[in-house]
Image (cartoon, rainbow, N blue to C red):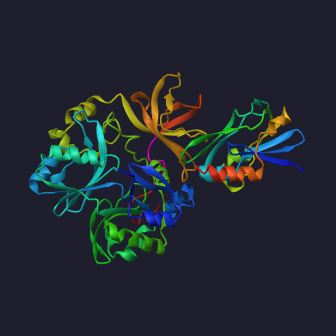
């Protein structure tokens, strides 16, 4: 079974082989409100753990999207760029942001599992 | 002094409002359906906005008050009919805008609606300018409820018979629950609508009845996207002390008759700017893609010269794209001028455009 982990910046990451799919959590979308703009990293570019790898904007404000692990961007989800409201509708499934070919699987170790993240999100409800 | 609550605070909570502190008040930024839905519901049906944080200043007086207020506001107040309203500004001697406001002629004097963040300072300024000759009340006992959108007239008229016959920018006293309420046909969303001044104790009841009739609460977030699509200025962002009404492209609000006399505060600068032109001016700006250019975004011309700055920018739900306003050097203010907006270090193409972004007639019976 593939493993889903969560970051303190409210991204989820699902690892299948050495390819990780990354998006933002439902909790993040609830804090942001209606998402009306999404910017993704370029395919073929390299991103570093905890670095910015995109932007989402609500009607109110812009927020950076961080990558919880390092790697090469192998795919991006154009559907959420064309219709950012999809991120609010299905954030942890079809509205993924980008896929990485990851460099170092051990970077996953410091991330939270679902129970820990849910607890973290509840405590950091700002 | 703690953060204040309006008389609708409990209702906001009951409707799952997210609160923000705004001008010293706990105000709802949005409810559970979110800004985009609240915005669209207002455009298509009817939205209710708690604007009780805004100042309701009553100044009592007759002919002499009219003369004294004409020294302050660039308005032809002696010809302002009873229960009619005008948009105006409080300026300093350099014509810098200290607040923008709506002034209505009422029986005993004038009612002036002021921005929440400015109201206490406005009161002080006006008291000094009027040399304490008149009774002035910044009424904290009244709430202000706006109902906006095409179904608002029908909905409000079910509760307050006769409001549907009001003309745009005029008002009157009506009865709700045997209480006197002052209702004007006005608003700040680009939609037909009303603002209701009502005693605090009755505001909750009125609002709940409006909701029962099919209107829905909308927060400050939707109010901001609605007013920006309508090309309307937000004080503290699009207007401030460093901008004059001519620079803000609001010269339509200055009485021509009063300009010819030139005897109001700031009139020297206004007349000079009307004759000689201005160096910067407020324009509408439409980014070409989906990129949102927010307040303080720098504007460049095609030769990469910095020519201005965005003062308000967001995503317009009815336009279904980004919209912005800002100030540019006058020579770049023509419609369809191509400009570039610097967002997160990159430059994006945009065009100067006319305002509003979203057009709708305020006049009843006109096809929309």
Taking the spot 10% from the left edge, 55% from the top edge, the residue there is B63
Q: Is residue A37 visible?
A: yes
Residue B159 falls in which quadrant of the image? bottom left
Image location of residue B166, percent across then percent down: 31, 67
Of residues B207 and A7, the one drawn nearer to the viewer in this rendering: A7
Of residues B343 and B232, the one drawn nearer to the viewer in this rendering: B343
Q: Main secondary structure of the magenta part?
A: loop
Is A70 contained in the magenta span? Answer: no
Give the tally of numbered discs.
0
Task: Give left or right: position of B50 versus A79.
Answer: left
Of residues A120 and B163, the one drawn nearer to the viewer in this rendering: A120
In the displayed structure, would residue B280 be above or below residue B141? above
Image location of residue B65, percent across then percent down: 12, 52
Q: Is residue A92 visible?
A: no
Taking the spot 35% from the left edge, 59% from the top edge, the residue there is B186
In the displayed structure, would residue B291 be above or below residue B172? above
Taking the spot 74% from the left edge, 38% from the top edge, the residue there is A68
Q: Which residues are magenta?
A: B353-358
Is B355 contained in the magenta span? Answer: yes
Residue B210 falls in which quadrant of the image? bottom left
Task: Give left or right: position of B108 versus A24.
Answer: left
Image location of residue B173, percent across then percent down: 26, 69
Image location of residue B34, percent across then percent down: 56, 57
Residue B334 falls in which quadrant of the image? top left
């Amino acid at each position: 079974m593939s493993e889903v982990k969560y970051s303190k910046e409210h991204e989820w990451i699902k690892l299948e082989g050495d390819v990780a799919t990354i998006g933002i959590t439902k909790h993040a979308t609830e804090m942001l409100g209606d998402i009306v703009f999404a910017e993704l990293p370029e395919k073929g570019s390299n991103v570093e753990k905890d670095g910015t790898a995109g932007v989402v904007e609500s009607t109110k404000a812009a927020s950076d999207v961080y990558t919880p692990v390092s790697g090469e961007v192998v795919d991006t989800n154009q559907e959420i760029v064309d219709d950012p409201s999809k991120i609010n509708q299905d954030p942890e499934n079809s509205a993924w942001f980008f896929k990485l070919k990851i460099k170092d699987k051990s970077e996953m170790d410091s991330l939270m599992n679902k129970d820990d993240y849910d607890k973290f999100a509840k405590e950091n409800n700002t | 002094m703690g953060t204040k609550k309006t008389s609708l605070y409990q209702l906001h909570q009951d409707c799952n409002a997210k609160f923000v502190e705004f001008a010293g008040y706990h105000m709802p930024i949005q409810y559970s359906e979110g800004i985009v839905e609240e915005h669209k519901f207002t455009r298509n049906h009817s939205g209710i906005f708690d604007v009780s944080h805004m100042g309701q200043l009553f100044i009592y007086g007759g002919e002499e008050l009219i003369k004294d207020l004409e020294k302050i506001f660039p308005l032809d107040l002696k010809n302002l009919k009873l229960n009619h309203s005008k948009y105006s500004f409080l300026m300093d001697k350099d014509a810098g805008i200290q607040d923008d406001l709506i002034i209505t002629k009422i029986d005993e004097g004038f009612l002036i609606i002021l921005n929440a963040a400015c109201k206490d300072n406005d009161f002080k300024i006006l008291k000094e300018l009027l040399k304490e000759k008149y009774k002035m009340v910044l009424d904290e006992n009244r709430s202000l409820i706006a109902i906006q959108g095409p179904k608002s007239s029908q909905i409000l008229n079910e509760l307050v018979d006769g409001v549907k016959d009001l003309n745009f920018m005029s008002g009157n006293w009506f009865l709700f629950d045997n209480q006197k309420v002052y209702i004007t046909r006005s608003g700040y969303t680009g939609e037909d609508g009303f603002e209701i001044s009502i005693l605090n104790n009755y505001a909750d009841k009125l609002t709940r009845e409006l909701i029962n009739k099919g209107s829905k609460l909308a927060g400050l977030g939707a109010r901001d996207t609605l007013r920006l699509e309508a090309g309307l200025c937000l004080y503290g962002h699009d207007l401030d002390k460093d901008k004059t009404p001519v620079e803000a492209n609001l010269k339509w609000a200055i009485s021509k008759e009063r300009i010819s006399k030139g005897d109001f505060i700031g009139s020297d600068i206004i007349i000079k700017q009307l004759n000689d032109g201005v160096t910067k001016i407020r324009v509408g700006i439409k980014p070409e893609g989906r990129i949102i250019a927010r307040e303080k975004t720098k504007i460049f011309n095609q030769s990469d010269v910095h020519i201005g700055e965005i003062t308000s920018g967001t995503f317009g739900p009815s336009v279904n794209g980004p919209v912005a306003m800002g100030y540019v050097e006058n020579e770049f203010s023509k419609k369809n001028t191509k400009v570039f907006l610097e967002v997160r270090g990159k430059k994006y193409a945009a065009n100067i455009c006319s305002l509003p972004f979203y057009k709708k007639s305020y006049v009843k019976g006109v096809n929309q």
